[in-house]
Every structure is written in C-alpha cells, then in structure tokens.
C-alpha cells in the first residue's frame, strides 16, 4: 500500500501578488537602510572634510549655488531655471557665473587654465554659427571687445539671450572645464560617487535583500516562504516535493537577487521579463531560478509540506512504515 500526497501548483496571479508585496517591502527596507547608511557615511570626519572642500570649490567657481540651510549645491543653470527669475536676472546671473569662473582660474594661480577658458569663451561667441534669426549674437566693437550684437538684442528678449547665448556655454563648456581644469575637483567628485555606490547603495541593497528575501525563508522554514508568499500560502518544494535544503535555498536567493534582480536595471528588464514569462507560459510554470534548481511553488492552503519522508510516517501516520508516493497536480 502506498500513500499518495498531492500538491497543486500555485496560481500565477497569486504568485505575482506575492512577488509585488515582497517588492514593496523591499523598497521600504531599502529606503530606510539607505538613509541610515548615508547618515553614517556623512557623519565621518573624512567625508565631511571632502564634502566641505567640494562645496567651497563649487561656490567660488560661480557655477553652482550652495543652499545655506543644507549642505547641498545645484548647478547654476538648473538653479536659475528652477527659481523662475525674470529675464534680466537670468541674463545677469548667467553672465556673472561665466565671469566669476574665468576670474576664478586667474585668481587661483592657473594661468594656463585662464588662457584656455578665456580663449574658449571668445571662440564660442565669435563662432559664425552663433546666430539668432540669421543675426550674429556677438560682434567686436571699435575697441576690439566682444559684445552682444545690437541687432541680436533688438530681435530677442533677455530670456532668449540667456537661453541661446549664455546657458549653453555654461552647461557644455564651463562644466567640463570645472572637471578638467580645477585641481582636486574631479577627485572630490569621484570620492563622493564611490562613497554613494560602495558605502551606501550596495550595503543598503544587500541588507534589504537579506531582510526581505532570505531571513523570512528561515523563519517560515516549512515551505521556505517570504512574507508575501506566507500571506498567500505559497510554499517552495524541491524535485522530491519536500522542503528544499539550506544550500539550494541560498543558491535560489543568490541567483534571483544578485544575478537576475541586480542585472534587470542594466538590461532593460530582460531577466525579470524572461523569468515571469517562464512562470506564465511554460508547462512547468517555473521562474528562471526555480528552473535552474528544479524547484516548484505550490499552493499549501490546507496542505502540509514536509522536510523529509520520515517526518510523514512519524507525525502523520504513526507506525505505518509504508512507501510514500508524491505527486504534482496541475492547476485546476
């Protein structure tokens, strides 16, 4: 006599709802852990020293606006656009930013950079392509100085003069010179970028994944459930239709979270699309990690899952000692 234990594969829509719930929890945990990691990093003396140095360079260069109430800066063009200044203030602030940066290279003992930036500004303004309604934006006056063409002034507004003549030079030329010509600036920016990625984003990502996708499967050991799958009563079984061993559980987490999930933002969502397509359209209804590890998700409402076959004969039918037969039923 054999004992038949049958399981039904979990429905696709229930699995999707469980995944969405887990993802929502992941976002909350990631946001909280990222804020915590960022606060810790920014409290270190070395970070504060480099951050202050970067803010100082940006403020003195004229290409950024530093907010007094917070250690935050924004490039001057974005600041001008966001603040909604009138045409005159847009034009004047852009002019001031350009002149301030050119003076900065001179005042800080960078004669080569000063000459390069000054020549670039002259070439930019006298470029034959620098026109508006077929009129040159800049000309040389009788003294040999480069000034705005009166015809350009007549045909345009101050806002147009700002948008067509000055803002592009700041965005596409001076911002590049800030990185290439100002000593230590590039190193300070790279330091902040590295800290953001390696000391804030990566630890927060790893911690969030462990909390949401790994810790629960050891709390809800019978079925290796996450919080979402516990709510929807979806259990994971291996090829024996028993609860997967620890090694396979860890492998599933690694494939899903550090391969499939991590690669998704860099591949236009291809890994997750493929995995969900396999869940929806293949005969086995397995995601990619489950297919690789021969795992299956089943509906365990009113049905118990087991760690081994011995557990069944001991706990469910004492003394039976008969061979056990497991079956997988298709979705109704």
Image: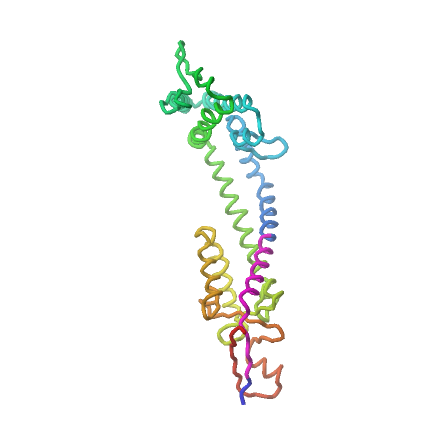
In the current view of this chain or complex, which residue is farthest to the top? 142
Q: Position of residue 8 (x, y in %)?
A: 55, 74
Residue 1 position (above or below residue 274): below
| Residue occupying image coordinates x 60% and y 68% | 233
Residue 178 position (above or below residue 312): above
Residue range corresponding to the magenta coloring: 4-27
Residue 262 position (above or below residue 229): above
Q: Quadrant of residue 222?
A: bottom right
Q: Position of residue 33 (x, y in %)?
A: 60, 50
Q: Quadrant of residue 168?
A: top left
Quadrant occupied by the C terminus: bottom right
Residue situated in front as seen by the camera: 115 or 176: 176
Q: Is residue 10 magenta?
A: yes
Magenta stretch mostly in which secondary structure?
Answer: helix
| Residue occupying image coordinates x 61% and y 52% | 28
Q: Is residue 38 visible?
A: yes
Q: Is residue 245 magenta?
A: no
In the current view of this chain or complex, which residue is farthest to the left? 128
Left or right of 130 on screen, residue 298? right
């Amino acid at each position: 006599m054999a004992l038949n234990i049958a399981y039904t594969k979990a429905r696709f829509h229930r699995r999707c709802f469980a995944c969405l719930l887990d993802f929502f929890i992941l976002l909350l945990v990631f946001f909280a852990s990222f804020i915590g990691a960022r606060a810790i990093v920014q409290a270190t003396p070395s970070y504060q020293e480099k951050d202050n140095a970067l803010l100082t360079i940006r403020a003195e260069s004229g290409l950024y606006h530093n907010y007094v109430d917070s250690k935050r800066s924004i490039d001057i063009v974005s600041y001008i656009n966001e603040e909604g200044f009138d045409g005159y203030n847009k034009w004047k602030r852009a002019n001031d930013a350009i002149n301030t940066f050119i003076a900065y290279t001179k005042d800080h003992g960078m004669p080569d950079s000063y000459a390069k930036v000054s020549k670039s500004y002259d070439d930019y303004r006298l470029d034959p392509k620098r026109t508006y309604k077929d009129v040159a934006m800049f000309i040389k006056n009788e003294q040999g100085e480069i000034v705005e063409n009166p015809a350009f002034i007549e045909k345009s507004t101050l806002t147009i003069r700002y948008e067509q003549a000055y803002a592009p030079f700041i965005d596409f030329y001076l911002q590049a010179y800030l990185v290439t010509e100002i000593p230590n600036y590039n190193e300070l920016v790279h330091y902040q970028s590295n800290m953001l990625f390696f000391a804030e984003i990566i630890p927060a990502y790893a911690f969030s994944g462990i909390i949401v996708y790994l810790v629960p499967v050891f709390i809800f050991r019978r079925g290796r459930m996450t919080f979402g799958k516990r709510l929807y009563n979806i259990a994971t079984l291996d090829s024996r239709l028993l609860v997967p061993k620890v090694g396979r559980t860890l492998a599933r987490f690694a494939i899903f979270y550090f391969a499939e999930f991590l690669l998704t933002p860099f591949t236009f969502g291809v890994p997750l699309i493929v995995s969900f397509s396999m869940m929806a359209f293949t005969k086995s209804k397995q995601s990619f990690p489950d297919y690789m590890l021969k795992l299956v998700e089943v509906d365990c409402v009113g049905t118990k899952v087991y760690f081994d076959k011995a557990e069944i004969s001991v706990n469910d039918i004492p003394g039976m000692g008969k061979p056990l037969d497991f079956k997988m039923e298709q979705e109704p």
